[in-house]
Image (cartoon, rainbow, N blue to C red):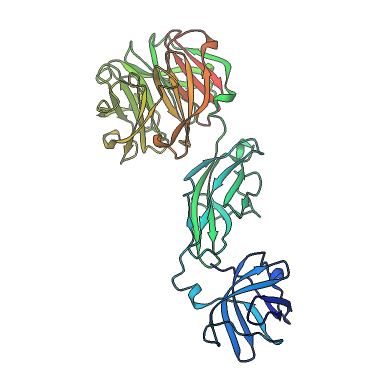
Amino acid sequence: MVKLVNRAKMKVASGGAGTLTLGTACDGYQTFAAAGVTDQDKLRYTITDGNDWEIGIGTYTASGTTLARAPTESSNSGNAITCGSGAEIFVTMAAEDFTGNVAPQFLTTPPLRLELDIDGSSAVTLNAKAYDESGFPLHYSWDAYTTGSNTIYDSGSLPPQIASAPTIDQSTGVYSIVGSSSPSNAGNINFRVKSSDGVMTATHYTTLVLEFGYNLSGATYANKSFDVSAKEPSPRGLAFSVDGSSMYIVGSTNDRVYQYTLSTAFDVTTAQYSTAKSVSAQASTPFEIRFSSDGYHMYVLCSTNNRIYQYDSPTAFNANSADYELTFDPTANATDPFGFCLSEDGSRLLVVSKSQKAIYQYNLSVDFVLSSAAYSGNSLDVSSQMNNPISATLSVSGTKLFVLDNGNSVVFQYQMSQANDLSTATYSNKSFSLTGQGTGSRQTVEFSTDGSSMYIMDLTNDKIWQYTT
């Protein structure tokens, strides 16, 4: 649409019936340039010259201060009027600017989620290029808000996840956004991009994610481990409560879930045995254990019959009070399931098939309830990176996936442009070798809630290894 500005009215210096040369501002008004009109902007104008008048679309040229005219209606039967010395021209609007005008359209839909860099200086880009069907110039802007809050952020009041005001290339619609380097600012922000033709505005919401940890590039051994052989000589699965105060293991010898209390959250060296829950009636050889993020659902994978069993508890993260609820069979797609994980919101289940060298995605119509799971049609082939995928886990944001290769004792990192959607997953070219802690059959990969620590269950050495990420 045409560009709109306030109080822009000028005298016509010359031009007659053609391109006009603009003179000075009329009394009480300002020049087009002072009002914000820039070179090659298109304007809706009105010319008055005595009883003669003309409405049209003009193209402004800053050099020489001229306006090329394209009349749409006039007192001269719709043709250009011949302007005399008393003619005046001003920026206005016409009825057609409101009638039938549609909002600009994005050429490429901006992403639903975008992960920010965490160094406080590197920018990520968001492409929001749009077009106007009438060919009028567009103006891009933004604001942001946190879900559940009435606070609206903009360049004068930045959300904590952003280190500096985003820059916008007004010719390409590309936003450059720098994330905060402070872990205290971690979280998500709803970032709204806007493209306006002066009257109508197209908007799109992108969730900006500022997430620390969950980065294999910076992983190191934390010099912390925990021996589980006193309870389970064949440890396979590992899980933690959301707050890190409880740890759970399963193994293929005793068919029990062992629960430990950690006096220091997510520090395995502070683990003390608490209680145990037998799952032998369902999972005679448990290989993997996971919990829902709210702690009221416990899941155990049995390698004997390739089923995942769901247990529900009235008390969050209390394995001993969990009762068997239902069974899920993934083998119609994942024929050889060795590991699995759930998304933070409980809407997705990912199952690792070792022999197929792939991860399969199931969508849950009822959050955290496996009986509502249906294969989504999405899978991730990991054979280019590994031969024996055995375990997988997601970051809290759902934008990072980690897969453990049992054969080479390596963890591989993948990125998803849309949270918990395997169809958008790509290998991040990031991996971490676990052989610094010797040889062994690694079984499970898990992270602390904030992603600052990674844990590996080692079947050969009966140990949990802790790493800093």
**Residue 350 versus residue 140: which sits nearer the camera?**
140
Q: State which quadrant residue 235 falls in.
A: top left
Q: State which quadrant residue 314 falls in.
A: top left
**Residue 380 versus residue 456: which sits nearer the camera?**
380
Q: Quarter of the image for the C terminus: give it.
A: top right
Q: Is residue 347 left or right of residue 186?
A: left
Q: Is residue 160 visible?
A: no
Name above or below for residue 448 compared with residue 164.
above
Name above or below for residue 26 compared with residue 333.
below
Q: Residue at x 61, y 55 (%)?
A: 170
Counting labels gives 0
Q: Is residue 236 visible?
A: yes
Q: Is residue 274 left or right of residue 254?
A: right
Residue 246 x, y percent position in the rendering: 46, 24
Residue 252 x, y percent position in the rendering: 33, 13
**Residue 224 versus residue 153: which sits nearer the camera?**
153
Name above or below for residue 399 compared with residue 69.
above
Residue 399 x, y percent position in the rendering: 47, 35
Residue 344 x, y percent position in the rendering: 42, 36
